[in-house]
Image: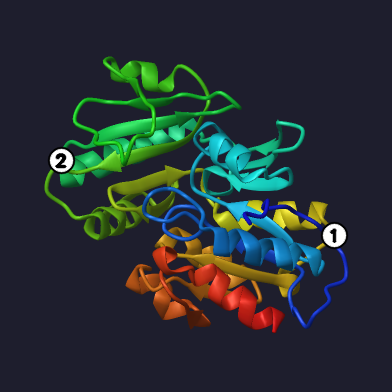
Amino acid sequence: MTATVSQGVGETSGGLPYRLIATDLDGTLLRSDDSVSPRTREALAAAAAAGAAHIVVTGRAVPWTRHILDDLGYSGLAVCGQGAQVYDAGERRLLTSVTLDRQLAKVALAKIEAEVGPLYLAASRDGLDGEVLVGPGYALTGALPGTPLTDVSDLWSAPLNKIYIQHPALSDDELAEAALRIAGGFVSVTMAGEGIVELLPLGLSKATGLSLAARRLGLKAADTLAFGDMPNDIPMFAWAAHGVAMANAHDDLKAVADEVTASHDEDGIAVVVERLLG
């Protein structure tokens, strides 16, 4: 039987020491085929029955997340856009949304390109139906939808949550390190996956959005078990009481994790939740 992933808050039972389970999506809750395994669904449903809330915390903005939440039957809060958006999936509305200062972003991009050369660009527009604009040369990951950007000036014509950058020669790690060193005083920089280096509002992280969502649920960091796989999950791990990296995780995240579980394709979340439920 496939259980529905749900969100509920209360006193936990059955020995579960956490009241909030925060999971990244790609490389964590989602398997390589973008599905959630029946075992993981069952484990999260059992945790909810024991009184723990499950909350998705993803780098994807709401338009790239909503169909996944619908498939899961998920009706609680979700943190999207690297913490920029707190989304009520049941009511289908944004509760909070943080946008990028476009003037600072322009300065940041100019400084980065002055040192490392031209970048390939994409950008996520704000809102429930915000498009992802994709400039020439930028390679989208997977089959996610994008809108071609032919005139770079259009990038700045409406509020943005983030800018994606790629480089023709630098690796993701090299590009993220360079962008942080050059423009870290203007924007936050994170790496969310293969080919996904992002410029965010200064000070924004998954921990920002998760703390806001947790507060709405009457929960706090000490109540939280977090799962992730990439460097953008490091702030969430720092905030949560216990951080679990997937076996497929980036080495930088494994280095700060409290434990490492099985991979996203081997039910790593379920392995930990089932153990905690006893």
Coordinates of residue 174 in the picture (x, y in percent): 22, 58
> What's the residue at 78%, 83% (across, down)?
15
Coordinates of residue 222 in the picture (x, y in percent): 73, 75
Q: Is residue 194 above or below residue 150?
A: below
> Looking at numbered disc 1 in the image, what kind of residue is underneath it?
Gly
Number of callouts: 2
Q: Is residue 224 left or right of residue 205?
A: right
Quadrant of res 248: bottom left
Q: Which mark is residue 117?
A: 2
Q: Is residue 58 above or below residue 256?
A: above
> What's the residue at 48%, 68% (across, down)?
267
Residue 23 in view in this figure: no
Q: Which quarter of the figure is the N terminus placed in? A: bottom right
Asked whether 241 or 45 is in front, the reply is 45
Which callout, 2 or 1, points at the residue further toward the start of the chain? 2
In front: label 2 or label 1 = 1
Residue 265 in view in this figure: yes
CB under 8 Å between callouts 2 and 1?
Answer: no
Label 2 CA crowd tier, 10 Å (few <14, some 14–19, many 20+): few
Q: Which mark is residue 142?
A: none
Q: Which residue does the numbered mark 1 point to in the structure image?
A: 218
Label 1 CA crowd tier, 10 Å (few <14, some 14–19, many 20+): few
> Looking at numbered disc 2 in the image, what kind of residue is underneath it?
Gly
